[in-house]
Image (cartoon, helix red, strand yellow):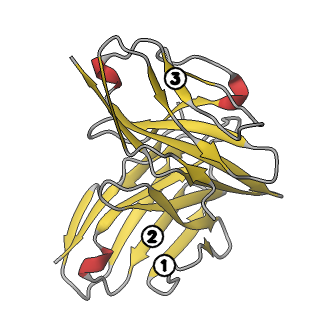
């Protein structure tokens, strides 16, 4: 069963427009969710994690357990935000970890 | 910050040969490392969890005899693609969780092309 769903493969917005990348999850335990970003020709890097409730590069994401969602939002998109974004769920089993990724959303911010 | 180094970044090999990919944690010890595979324009798929001093745990559908994982030290895990075939061509990425860090750190990946 797919644990992490990102319904949009591609998302295109204009600079200055709000952007929301959707992520839904399926997990019976207490979820630990992350957003990772992969800029062109760069390695995957952590953008933010739900537990810290932080804003990174203007992005925020709120865990909604009722809707089992962890959507990533930014009020005013910038061209440099263009990248591949992955939502990820960390599953813990005792001392074992498993990070499962969604299929990713390619965000393009047009000038 | 915590860095995971992966080598080589690119490799081209002939069909039937074996290729070894190294993953090193540069400034921390990693008892567990993870190997992912990423197909073009697709997500990362976990292949296996590498455990220092013990056998790796493979995900369903991953051939353990084909993708040999060795985690001989706290800073090094290797993935060997044995008897490589063109369908093994992919982007392989390793990762680890540095102590005290709430998240994974990823290597820069290895682009394997089997011709």
Residue B43 location (% of width, % of height): 43, 54
Disc nearer the start of the sequence (1/2): 1
Q: Which residue is mark 2?
A: B79
Residue A94 location (% of width, % of height): 83, 58
Q: Quadrant of the N terminus of chain A?
A: bottom right
Task: Assess whether mark 2 and mark 1 are in contact (beta carbons under 8 angstroms).
Answer: yes
Relative height, residue A51 to residue B15 (above, below): above
Residue A82 location (% of width, % of height): 31, 28
* Mark number displayed over residue A73: 3
- Picture quadrant where residue A31 is located: top right
Relative height, residue A6 to residue A16 (above, below): below
* Mark number displayed over residue B68: 1
What chain does badge 2 belong to? B
Count of marks, rendered view: 3
In the image, A32: left or right of A59? right
| Few, some or many residues within 10 Å of mark 2 (<14, 14–19, 20+) | many
Pick whichever, B89 or A83, lies toward us: A83
Q: Are marks 1 and 2 on the same chain?
A: yes
Q: Helix, strand or loop at disc 3? A: strand
Q: Helix, strand or loop at disc 1? A: strand
What residue is drawn where x is 36% and y is 71%?
B20
Tag in front: 1 or 3: 3
In the image, A95: left or right of A72? right
């Amino acid at each position: 069963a797919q644990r992490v769903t990102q319904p949009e493969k591609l998302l295109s917005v204009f600079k200055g427009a709000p952007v929301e990348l959707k992520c839904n999850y399926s997990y019976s335990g207490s979820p630990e969710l992350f957003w990772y970003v992969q800029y062109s020709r760069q390695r995957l890097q952590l953008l933010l994690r739900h537990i810290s409730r932080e804003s990174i590069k203007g992005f925020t994401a709120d865990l909604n357990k009722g809707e089992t969602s962890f959507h990533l939002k930014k009020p005013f998109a910038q061209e440099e935000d263009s990248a591949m974004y992955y939502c990820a769920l960390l599953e813990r089993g005792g001392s074992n970890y498993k990070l499962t990724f969604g299929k990713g959303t390619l965000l393009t911010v047009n000038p | 910050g915590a860095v995971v180094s992966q080598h080589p970044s690119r490799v081209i090999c002939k069909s039937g040969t074996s290729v070894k990919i190294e993953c090193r944690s540069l400034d921390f010890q990693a008892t567990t490392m993870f190997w992912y595979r990423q197909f073009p324009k697709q997500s990362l798929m976990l292949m296996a969890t590498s455990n220092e001093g013990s056998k790796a745990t493979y995900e369903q559908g991953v051939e353990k005899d084909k993708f040999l994982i060795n985690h001989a030290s706290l800073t090094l895990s290797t993935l060997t693609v044995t008897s490589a075939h063109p369908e093994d061509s992919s982007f392989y990425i390793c990762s680890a969780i540095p102590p005290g860090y709430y998240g994974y750190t990823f290597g820069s990946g290895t682009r394997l092309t089997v011709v």
